[in-house]
Amino acid sequence: MKPPYNITGEIVRLVSEISHKIGEVNASFLTKQSPELRKTNRIRTIQASLAVEGNTLSVGQITAIIENKKVLGPSKDIQEVTNAIEVYNQLNKLNPFSEKSFLLAHKILMSGLIKNSGKYRTSGVGIVKGSHLAHLAPPASNVSFLMKDLFTYLKKSDELMLIKSCVFHYEMEFIHPFSDGNGRMGRLWQTLLLMNEYPLFEFLPFETLISKNQKKYYHALSTSDKQGNSTFFIVFMLTILSESLDELLAERPGPLSSADRIRIFLSNGIQEFTRKDYLGYFKTISSATASRDLAMAVKDRLIKRIGDKNKTVYQIKDTLTHN
Protein backbone atom coordinates (compact mmCIF):
# COMPACT_ATOMS: atom_id res chain seq x y z
CA MET A 1 0.00 0.00 0.00
CA LYS A 2 1.46 3.36 -1.05
CA PRO A 3 1.99 5.74 1.88
CA PRO A 4 -0.16 8.90 1.61
CA TYR A 5 1.46 12.05 0.14
CA ASN A 6 0.90 14.50 -2.71
CA ILE A 7 3.38 15.69 -5.33
CA THR A 8 3.02 19.48 -5.16
CA GLY A 9 4.51 22.20 -7.32
CA GLU A 10 6.93 23.01 -4.50
CA ILE A 11 8.15 19.41 -4.41
CA VAL A 12 8.64 19.37 -8.21
CA ARG A 13 10.60 22.65 -7.99
CA LEU A 14 12.82 21.35 -5.19
CA VAL A 15 13.52 18.05 -6.96
CA SER A 16 14.56 19.95 -10.10
CA GLU A 17 16.75 22.29 -8.04
CA ILE A 18 18.44 19.42 -6.20
CA SER A 19 19.02 17.47 -9.43
CA HIS A 20 20.75 20.49 -10.95
CA LYS A 21 22.96 20.91 -7.88
CA ILE A 22 23.86 17.21 -7.86
CA GLY A 23 25.04 17.67 -11.44
CA GLU A 24 27.19 20.63 -10.37
CA VAL A 25 28.72 18.61 -7.54
CA ASN A 26 29.48 15.65 -9.79
CA ALA A 27 31.01 17.93 -12.42
CA SER A 28 33.30 19.36 -9.74
CA PHE A 29 34.41 15.88 -8.58
CA LEU A 30 33.86 16.88 -4.99
CA THR A 31 33.23 13.26 -4.02
CA LYS A 32 36.64 12.31 -5.41
CA GLN A 33 38.86 15.31 -4.94
CA SER A 34 39.37 15.43 -1.21
CA PRO A 35 39.64 12.43 1.12
CA GLU A 36 40.08 14.99 3.92
CA LEU A 37 36.77 16.64 3.03
CA ARG A 38 35.01 13.28 2.96
CA LYS A 39 36.39 12.38 6.40
CA THR A 40 35.44 15.78 7.85
CA ASN A 41 31.90 15.56 6.49
CA ARG A 42 31.45 12.03 7.84
CA ILE A 43 32.44 13.25 11.31
CA ARG A 44 30.07 16.21 11.02
CA THR A 45 27.25 13.84 10.03
CA ILE A 46 27.82 11.59 13.04
CA GLN A 47 28.08 14.52 15.45
CA ALA A 48 24.95 16.21 14.11
CA SER A 49 22.75 13.11 14.07
CA LEU A 50 23.66 12.23 17.65
CA ALA A 51 23.38 15.86 18.81
CA VAL A 52 19.72 15.81 17.74
CA GLU A 53 19.28 12.97 20.24
CA GLY A 54 21.11 14.83 23.03
CA ASN A 55 24.68 13.57 22.60
CA THR A 56 27.16 16.12 23.99
CA LEU A 57 30.39 15.15 22.21
CA SER A 58 31.97 17.68 19.85
CA VAL A 59 33.42 17.21 16.39
CA GLY A 60 36.89 17.32 17.96
CA GLN A 61 36.05 14.58 20.46
CA ILE A 62 34.54 12.36 17.76
CA THR A 63 37.66 12.88 15.65
CA ALA A 64 39.76 11.77 18.62
CA ILE A 65 37.66 8.61 19.05
CA ILE A 66 38.15 7.76 15.36
CA GLU A 67 41.90 8.24 15.88
CA ASN A 68 41.80 5.87 18.91
CA LYS A 69 42.61 8.64 21.36
CA LYS A 70 41.26 8.81 24.89
CA VAL A 71 38.22 11.04 25.26
CA LEU A 72 36.59 12.28 28.46
CA GLY A 73 32.82 12.34 28.36
CA PRO A 74 29.69 10.45 29.41
CA SER A 75 30.15 6.73 28.72
CA LYS A 76 26.74 6.59 26.99
CA ASP A 77 27.73 9.39 24.61
CA ILE A 78 31.04 7.69 23.81
CA GLN A 79 29.23 4.38 23.16
CA GLU A 80 26.77 6.14 20.84
CA VAL A 81 29.63 7.65 18.85
CA THR A 82 31.56 4.36 18.68
CA ASN A 83 28.44 2.59 17.40
CA ALA A 84 27.70 5.33 14.85
CA ILE A 85 31.26 5.19 13.51
CA GLU A 86 30.92 1.43 13.09
CA VAL A 87 27.60 1.58 11.22
CA TYR A 88 28.74 4.42 8.94
CA ASN A 89 31.89 2.44 8.15
CA GLN A 90 29.62 -0.39 6.97
CA LEU A 91 27.24 1.72 4.88
CA ASN A 92 28.47 0.20 1.62
CA LYS A 93 27.68 -3.29 2.92
CA LEU A 94 24.07 -2.47 3.84
CA ASN A 95 21.22 -2.99 1.39
CA PRO A 96 18.81 0.00 1.61
CA PHE A 97 15.91 -2.16 0.33
CA SER A 98 16.46 -4.97 2.85
CA GLU A 99 14.59 -5.13 6.14
CA LYS A 100 17.28 -7.54 7.36
CA SER A 101 19.96 -4.89 6.73
CA PHE A 102 17.76 -2.32 8.45
CA LEU A 103 17.58 -4.43 11.61
CA LEU A 104 21.32 -5.15 11.47
CA ALA A 105 22.09 -1.43 11.27
CA HIS A 106 19.93 -0.78 14.34
CA LYS A 107 21.68 -3.60 16.19
CA ILE A 108 25.07 -1.99 15.53
CA LEU A 109 23.82 1.53 16.20
CA MET A 110 22.21 0.69 19.56
CA SER A 111 24.56 -2.07 20.76
CA GLY A 112 25.26 -1.70 24.48
CA LEU A 113 22.66 1.07 24.77
CA ILE A 114 19.41 -0.93 24.87
CA LYS A 115 18.68 -4.59 25.50
CA ASN A 116 16.68 -5.23 22.34
CA SER A 117 18.95 -3.67 19.72
CA GLY A 118 18.16 -4.96 16.24
CA LYS A 119 14.62 -5.98 17.21
CA TYR A 120 11.27 -4.26 16.84
CA ARG A 121 9.57 -3.04 20.01
CA THR A 122 7.11 -5.28 21.82
CA SER A 123 5.23 -2.61 23.77
CA GLY A 124 3.35 0.61 23.07
CA VAL A 125 5.20 3.91 22.85
CA GLY A 126 4.33 7.60 22.73
CA ILE A 127 6.41 10.74 22.26
CA VAL A 128 5.85 13.38 24.93
CA LYS A 129 6.76 17.03 24.34
CA GLY A 130 6.49 19.08 27.48
CA SER A 131 3.25 18.10 29.19
CA HIS A 132 1.36 16.75 26.18
CA LEU A 133 1.50 13.62 24.04
CA ALA A 134 2.99 14.69 20.70
CA HIS A 135 2.73 11.32 18.95
CA LEU A 136 1.16 7.97 19.77
CA ALA A 137 2.83 5.29 17.66
CA PRO A 138 0.87 2.34 16.22
CA PRO A 139 0.47 -0.71 18.49
CA ALA A 140 3.52 -2.97 18.75
CA SER A 141 1.52 -5.81 17.18
CA ASN A 142 1.28 -3.77 13.95
CA VAL A 143 4.94 -2.80 13.65
CA SER A 144 6.20 -5.86 11.78
CA PHE A 145 3.66 -5.76 8.94
CA LEU A 146 3.79 -1.93 8.72
CA MET A 147 7.57 -2.10 8.21
CA LYS A 148 7.19 -4.89 5.65
CA ASP A 149 4.71 -2.69 3.76
CA LEU A 150 7.15 0.21 3.90
CA PHE A 151 9.99 -1.87 2.46
CA THR A 152 7.64 -3.17 -0.24
CA TYR A 153 6.99 0.46 -1.18
CA LEU A 154 10.75 1.06 -1.39
CA LYS A 155 11.26 -1.94 -3.66
CA LYS A 156 8.24 -1.59 -5.95
CA SER A 157 7.42 2.11 -6.20
CA ASP A 158 8.73 3.91 -9.29
CA GLU A 159 8.77 7.21 -7.38
CA LEU A 160 11.95 9.30 -7.58
CA MET A 161 14.43 8.32 -4.87
CA LEU A 162 14.69 11.93 -3.69
CA ILE A 163 11.00 11.74 -2.76
CA LYS A 164 10.93 8.08 -1.74
CA SER A 165 13.74 8.55 0.77
CA CYS A 166 11.80 11.38 2.46
CA VAL A 167 8.64 9.26 2.56
CA PHE A 168 10.52 6.38 4.18
CA HIS A 169 12.11 8.75 6.72
CA TYR A 170 8.72 10.12 7.77
CA GLU A 171 6.80 6.83 7.74
CA MET A 172 9.49 5.08 9.76
CA GLU A 173 9.36 7.85 12.36
CA PHE A 174 5.55 7.55 12.43
CA ILE A 175 5.66 3.77 12.95
CA HIS A 176 8.41 4.22 15.56
CA PRO A 177 9.44 0.56 15.23
CA PHE A 178 12.11 0.52 17.95
CA SER A 179 12.06 1.24 21.65
CA ASP A 180 14.90 3.71 21.04
CA GLY A 181 17.09 4.91 18.17
CA ASN A 182 14.25 5.69 15.74
CA GLY A 183 15.41 9.22 14.91
CA ARG A 184 18.98 8.30 14.09
CA MET A 185 17.78 5.26 12.09
CA GLY A 186 15.42 7.43 10.03
CA ARG A 187 18.20 9.83 9.11
CA LEU A 188 20.73 7.03 8.54
CA TRP A 189 18.39 5.13 6.21
CA GLN A 190 17.55 8.21 4.19
CA THR A 191 21.29 8.71 3.70
CA LEU A 192 21.67 5.09 2.60
CA LEU A 193 18.76 5.30 0.15
CA LEU A 194 20.09 8.51 -1.40
CA MET A 195 23.69 7.32 -1.71
CA ASN A 196 22.45 4.16 -3.46
CA GLU A 197 21.47 6.42 -6.38
CA TYR A 198 23.73 9.43 -5.78
CA PRO A 199 27.07 8.36 -4.21
CA LEU A 200 27.88 11.93 -3.14
CA PHE A 201 25.24 11.66 -0.37
CA GLU A 202 27.53 9.32 1.56
CA PHE A 203 29.57 12.37 2.50
CA LEU A 204 26.97 15.14 2.36
CA PRO A 205 26.40 16.16 6.00
CA PHE A 206 22.77 17.25 5.64
CA GLU A 207 22.22 16.14 9.22
CA THR A 208 24.13 19.22 10.39
CA LEU A 209 21.30 21.35 9.01
CA ILE A 210 18.71 19.13 10.70
CA SER A 211 20.63 19.64 13.96
CA LYS A 212 20.61 23.41 13.46
CA ASN A 213 16.88 23.29 12.66
CA GLN A 214 15.68 20.78 15.23
CA LYS A 215 12.48 22.67 16.05
CA LYS A 216 11.56 22.89 12.35
CA TYR A 217 12.40 19.19 11.93
CA TYR A 218 10.08 18.12 14.72
CA HIS A 219 7.47 20.63 13.56
CA ALA A 220 7.57 19.06 10.07
CA LEU A 221 7.07 15.58 11.55
CA SER A 222 4.23 16.84 13.77
CA THR A 223 2.52 18.74 10.94
CA SER A 224 2.58 15.68 8.69
CA ASP A 225 1.10 13.64 11.56
CA LYS A 226 -1.78 16.11 11.86
CA GLN A 227 -2.31 16.26 8.08
CA GLY A 228 -2.29 12.47 7.76
CA ASN A 229 0.36 12.41 5.00
CA SER A 230 4.08 13.10 4.55
CA THR A 231 3.80 15.98 2.05
CA PHE A 232 4.84 18.71 4.49
CA PHE A 233 7.79 16.63 5.71
CA ILE A 234 8.91 15.90 2.13
CA VAL A 235 9.07 19.63 1.40
CA PHE A 236 11.06 20.22 4.61
CA MET A 237 13.59 17.47 3.90
CA LEU A 238 14.06 18.42 0.24
CA THR A 239 14.74 21.99 1.40
CA ILE A 240 17.37 20.67 3.83
CA LEU A 241 18.99 18.59 1.06
CA SER A 242 19.06 21.58 -1.29
CA GLU A 243 20.64 23.83 1.33
CA SER A 244 23.21 21.13 2.20
CA LEU A 245 24.23 20.92 -1.46
CA ASP A 246 24.66 24.71 -1.45
CA GLU A 247 27.08 24.37 1.47
CA LEU A 248 29.00 21.63 -0.30
CA LEU A 249 29.24 23.66 -3.50
CA ALA A 250 30.55 26.62 -1.49
CA GLU A 251 33.48 24.41 -0.45
CA ARG A 252 34.26 23.59 -4.08
CA PRO A 253 38.04 23.71 -4.59
CA GLY A 254 39.76 25.48 -7.43
CA PRO A 255 41.45 23.74 -10.39
CA LEU A 256 43.52 20.72 -9.44
CA SER A 257 47.24 20.52 -10.07
CA SER A 258 48.93 17.39 -11.41
CA ALA A 259 50.17 16.63 -7.89
CA ASP A 260 46.63 17.01 -6.51
CA ARG A 261 45.20 14.60 -9.06
CA ILE A 262 47.87 11.98 -8.40
CA ARG A 263 47.43 12.28 -4.62
CA ILE A 264 43.65 11.91 -4.89
CA PHE A 265 43.83 8.99 -7.31
CA LEU A 266 46.36 7.06 -5.22
CA SER A 267 44.39 7.69 -2.00
CA ASN A 268 41.72 5.27 -3.26
CA GLY A 269 43.99 2.30 -2.60
CA ILE A 270 44.29 1.09 -6.20
CA GLN A 271 47.40 -1.07 -6.71
CA GLU A 272 47.64 -1.40 -10.49
CA PHE A 273 46.06 0.67 -13.25
CA THR A 274 46.38 1.98 -16.80
CA ARG A 275 46.27 5.46 -18.26
CA LYS A 276 42.72 4.64 -19.38
CA ASP A 277 41.75 3.99 -15.75
CA TYR A 278 43.24 7.35 -14.77
CA LEU A 279 41.34 9.12 -17.55
CA GLY A 280 38.17 7.36 -16.47
CA TYR A 281 38.59 8.82 -13.00
CA PHE A 282 39.31 12.38 -14.16
CA LYS A 283 36.98 12.63 -17.13
CA THR A 284 37.68 16.31 -17.88
CA ILE A 285 41.42 16.06 -18.54
CA SER A 286 43.03 15.26 -21.89
CA SER A 287 45.14 12.20 -22.75
CA ALA A 288 48.23 14.42 -22.90
CA THR A 289 47.53 15.79 -19.41
CA ALA A 290 47.06 12.27 -18.05
CA SER A 291 50.38 11.21 -19.59
CA ARG A 292 52.14 14.20 -18.01
CA ASP A 293 50.61 13.44 -14.60
CA LEU A 294 51.70 9.82 -14.71
CA ALA A 295 55.17 10.67 -15.96
CA MET A 296 55.58 13.08 -13.05
CA ALA A 297 54.42 10.41 -10.58
CA VAL A 298 56.94 7.94 -12.05
CA LYS A 299 59.69 10.57 -11.78
CA ASP A 300 58.70 11.25 -8.14
CA ARG A 301 58.81 7.49 -7.50
CA LEU A 302 55.20 7.34 -6.37
CA ILE A 303 54.40 4.73 -9.01
CA LYS A 304 56.39 2.53 -11.38
CA ARG A 305 55.76 1.97 -15.06
CA ILE A 306 55.70 -1.54 -16.52
CA GLY A 307 55.44 -2.35 -20.23
CA ASP A 308 55.32 -0.07 -23.25
CA LYS A 309 52.77 1.72 -25.45
CA ASN A 310 49.26 0.22 -25.21
CA LYS A 311 50.50 -2.51 -22.86
CA THR A 312 51.73 -0.04 -20.24
CA VAL A 313 50.47 -0.48 -16.69
CA TYR A 314 51.35 1.45 -13.54
CA GLN A 315 51.84 0.03 -10.07
CA ILE A 316 51.99 1.66 -6.66
CA LYS A 317 55.49 1.67 -5.27
CA ASP A 318 55.93 -0.70 -2.30
CA THR A 319 57.02 2.18 -0.08
CA LEU A 320 53.71 3.96 -0.69
CA THR A 321 51.67 0.82 -0.15
CA HIS A 322 53.13 0.29 3.32
CA ASN A 323 52.69 3.89 4.47
Image (cartoon, helix red, strand yellow):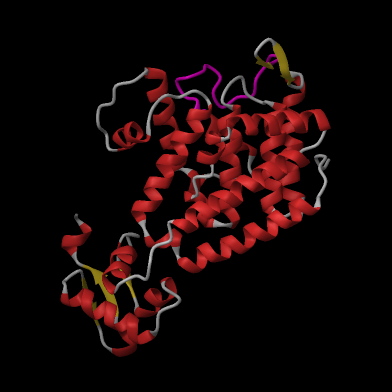
Q: Say above or below: 123 vs 285.
A: above
**Which image quarter: residue 125?**
top right
Q: Is residue 151 left or right of residue 254?
A: right
Taking depth in this image into account, of 282 and 274 the one nearest to the observer is 282
**Which image quarter: residue 173?**
top right
Q: Quadrant of the C terminus?
A: bottom left
Q: Main secondary structure of the magenta part?
A: loop
Q: Quadrant of the N terminus?
A: top right
- Would residue 109 be counted in the magenta stretch? yes
Q: Say above or below: 98 vs 285.
A: above
Q: Is residue 60 left or right of residue 302?
A: right
Which residue reaches farthest top?
131
Taking depth in this image into account, of 263 and 239 the one nearest to the observer is 239
Range drawn in magenta: 107-125
Residue depicted at x 70% and y 36%: 170
Q: Is residue 305 left or right of residue 220?
A: left
Residue depicted at x 35% and y 55%: 35
Q: Is residue 237 visible?
A: yes
Residue 247, horizontal then vertical, whole percent: 50, 52
Residue depicted at x 37% and y 18%: 75
Residue 54, horizontal then vertical, whole percent: 49, 23
Q: Is residue 167 visible?
A: no
- Would residue 88 be counted in the magenta stretch? no
